[in-house]
Image (cartoon, grey):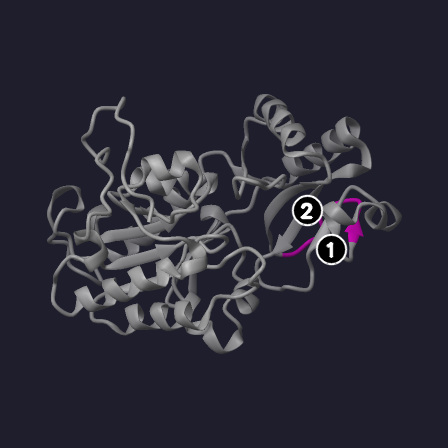
Amino acid sequence: MLFSANSTEKGRGAVIKLALSDLDNTLIPYGQGRASDAAIAAVRAVNAAPGVLAGPISGRTVAMMSWMFENDAADCFQTGVFVNGQVVRLRGRVIYQEAPARESLERLIAYLRKRDGERTALTAYDNDREDSDIVVGITNEELARHPKAFHAFRRTSAHIPAGTYVKNNIHSDHSRAHMEDLRHDLVRDFPEFDFVFPSAASSTLDILPAGVSKMSGLTILMDQLGIGLNEVCVFGDSENDLAIIEGVPNSVAVSNAAPKVAAAARWHIGAVIEDAVAGALLDIAAAAKTGAMPAFMREGGENPCDAGAPPTCVSSAPMG
């Protein structure tokens, strides 16, 4: 056991020993490209504090961290949950990794081609290499015809190549409404997978082995650390954060979060563009030195519909 577990019920008065943040539109604004200097400094401050760790809890691969934090900030993602729970890392070592079943993915590739033609396709990302991301089931010519969907890709393949391809998405240049209809069909036809949107506006779908989520990955990490849920703090904004926001007592929504996430979160802070998570992380680092609750948990940002409230409760907590 790396830490002792001695905090109170439901997180009230708990000493935070693990702080994990979603990246896209939680720690890093869309379009910014990388974590701000303030965010990097805040993650480092937590990791330097006694008895506490910080890192990402993201749908991204470990390989993607090198540009989201930049190579000189590799210390910021030594510990974390990646690919929505399919990869878990502790102090630089991968302690868990699960890829979707290849046979089912190949069936999904054919399904998408038949249903949507060349405008919608499965994408695959190598967990260890950034330069091997690929679109599967369309040709290079078709790739070029749909830059809205596939602008970030340079390679295609008829089948998923060999390698550490852990992360899979569905990319499309169809509308969000079309993709919601597609997801409805996929849930029915592919029960071996879960399909989640990574953001409130995205038309991309994340593909996960059924039952895998950021919460399942977090549970693995907690078990390795020997800590309880009430000693964890998580930050999020979107649908693929909902499992952790609902499951962790000290869950935090940024003010730009999707309504479901905001309603489920216990604590509310400012917007991603304000580096609000960085400020909260600095509070956690300061609190670790004294054994106190972080300051942002003492400043009126609590959701009245926290754990133990009636299920009909509707949050009116301030959103930042």
Residue carrying label 1 = 153
Amino acid type, callout 1: Phe
- Say if mark 2 contacts mark 1, CB within 8 Å: yes
What residue range appears in magenta?
156-163
Residue at screen point 24% across, 33% down = 305
Q: Secondary structure at mark 1?
A: loop
- Check disc 2 and report its element: helix, strand or loop: strand
Whole-number angstrom distance, CA of label 2 to CA of label 1: 9 Å
* Relative height, residue 303 to residue 232 (above, below): above
Magenta-highlighted stretch: main secondary structure? Answer: loop
Relative placement, left or right, of 7 versus 310 is left
| Residue 101 horizontal/vertical position (percent) | 59, 39
Image label count: 2
Expressed as whole percent of the image width and height from the top left, the position of residue 277 reads 36, 58
* Residue 92 visible in the current orientation: no
Q: Residue 270: percent from the left, percent from the top?
A: 35, 53
- Report which residue position mark 2 lands on: 123
Q: Is residue 267 left or right of residue 138?
A: left
Q: Earlier in the sequence, mark 2 or mark 1?
A: 2
Image height check: is 121 above or below 14? above
